[in-house]
Amino acid sequence: MANVLLISGSVFGAATLTADEIESTLDEAGHTVTRPEEPGVESLTDESQEWLIVCTSSTGNGDLPEELTPLYHGLLNDYPKIIHLKFAVVALGDSSYETYCGGGLSIDAALADLGATRMAEPFKIDAMEVTEPEAIAPDWVLSVINGTVETN
Ligand SMILES: Cc1cc2nc3c(=O)[nH]c(=O)nc-3n(C[C@H](O)[C@H](O)[C@H](O)COP(=O)(O)O)c2cc1C
């Protein structure tokens, strides 16, 4: 069973609800989930955490929601040591934007640049097609952690 750090960023609540469901699913599967209220780089440098799951929407022009801005800037400016982390990103977005899933893709790139191990390409969920991201993201996260993921 894995120690999983779960971080979410949302504007209107869909990514928060999706992260809630991810948390329940991982809990039920026997994993230990930590979900910091105000995630900063210090939560990522905790070496007792093996996995990082980020679940975020996009806002503006491919930007991250405000609650993830401090973490993102910390990743870019503080160069935290996070090479112990395996990570995967659930990216909520809307394909009618040119910057489709830009927020999720930015944090995915920043984590990989710092040497964390990307265990799957970001799981993009398009609001044009999917009305309940919380119904599909938890099983994807579980399959990534179990090593049985299929790409979307
Ligand atoms: C003002 C605004 C800007 C948005 N910008 C983007 C964007 O740049 N790229 C994208 O993929 N989705 C964009 N979206 C779509 C949201 O990311 C998508 O609807 C998501 O499911 C919302 O999740 P949330 O409720 O957690 O914020 C935008 C939505 C709004 C309202």
Image (cartoon, rainbow, N blue to C red):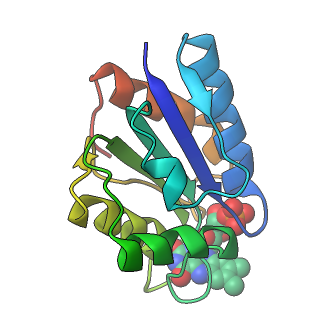
Identified at 28% across, 23% down, the residue is 148
**Can residue 54 be seen here?**
no
Quadrant for residue 109, please give it: bottom left
| Residue at the spot 33% in from the left edge and 60% down from the top edge | 111
Judged left or right of residue 129, residue 89 is left
Q: Nearer the viewer, residue 133 or 87?
A: 87
Q: Residue 122: where, in percent of width, then height?
A: 36, 54
Q: Is residue 10 visible?
A: yes
Quadrant observed for ligand 1 in the rendered image: bottom right
Q: Quadrant of the N terminus?
A: top left
Q: Residue, x 72% and y 51% (percent of image)?
A: 16
Q: Residue at x 65, y 40 (%)?
A: 35
Residue 52 pos. (x, y %): 44, 42
- Residue 8 % position (x, y): 62, 53
Q: Nearer the viewer, residue 123 or 74?
A: 74
Q: In x, y percent, where is residue 2? A: 43, 20
Q: Is residue 93 above or below residue 124?
A: below
Q: Nearer the viewer, residue 73 or 146?
A: 73
Q: Is residue 126 left or right of residue 143?
A: right
What is the number of callouts on the image? 0
Relative depth, front residue between 42 and 31: 42
The relative height of residue 26 versus residue 18 in the rendered view (above or below) is: above
